Image (spheres, rainbow, N blue to C red):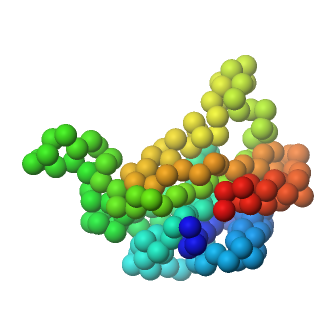
Amino acid sequence: MKNIFLINAHQAYPLSEGKLNQSLIQKAQDILENKGYSLRKTAMTDSYTVEEELEKHQWADAIILQSPVNWMGVSWSFKKYMDQVYTAGMTGELCNGDGRSRKDTSKQYGSGGTMKGKKYMFSLTFNAPKEAFDDHHQFLFVGKSVDDLFFPMHMNFRFFGMEALDTFACFDVLKNPKIENDFERFAAHLDRLF
């Protein structure tokens, strides 16, 4: 891997300006550029064209999606981005439709990805504490993991034939932030994967 596409999915939210997500993008940029990677970036606050975004996806060996978790998912602006960019990419840039064919009924739904060999990583910021996950005694997530919560997002990238890298998460960022520790963990996470 030598080409990395960084996507900052933060959208201004009443509880957050997006400084942490932007800081994580900057840290990723600094770390990866120091290691010799080529980078391209998009932020949901930037203007973009569908064609340029499809080209960035095709150029990248790996995509890092940096996102706050708003209402158990990504921001509305990244959902809009997916509707625009990912739908346009279904004609071969990202996938050949859903992969099925009337001529070959053995093809499975979701097998049409044209991005095989490429990787993706989620880096997420949560108000939820770490203890809320992976514990059947917790009220909201009832034992589910961060990756269980983000299963639909994983499926979006798998739809393109991409492979997941380990997810990174910052927890409790509003009520009990440990930002310096999060930055150290993030650097170690990137060092391990890239």
Q: Position of residue 60 (x, y in %)?
A: 51, 71
Query: Which corner quadrant of the image does residue 87 belong to?
Result: bottom left
Q: Quadrant of the C terminus?
A: bottom right
For the image, the number of numbered tags is 0
Q: Position of residue 175 (x, y in %)?
A: 86, 46
Q: Is residue 175 left or right of residue 11?
A: right
- The one nearer the camera, 147 or 111, is 111
Evaluate whether residue 139 shows in this view.
no
Q: Is residue 121 above or below residue 175?
A: below
**In the image, what residue occupies the spot 90% across and 58% down?**
180
Q: Is residue 172 left or right of residue 158?
A: right
- The one nearer the camera, 140 or 180, is 180
Evaluate whether residue 43 shows in this view.
yes
Q: Is residue 163 left or right of residue 174?
A: left
**In the image, what residue occupies the spot 28% across and 43% down?**
109
> Please, which residue is most extreme toward the top here?
137
> Please, which residue is most extreme toward the left here?
103
Q: Is residue 56 above or below residue 129?
A: below
- The one nearer the camera, 95 or 72, is 95
Q: Is residue 31 above or below residue 113?
A: below
**In the image, what residue occupies the spot 43% across and 71% down?**
58
Q: Position of residue 90 (x, y in %)?
A: 31, 62
**In the image, what residue occupies the spot 65% across and 24% down?**
142
Q: Quadrant of the N terminus?
A: bottom right
Q: Position of residue 69 (x, y in %)?
A: 65, 50
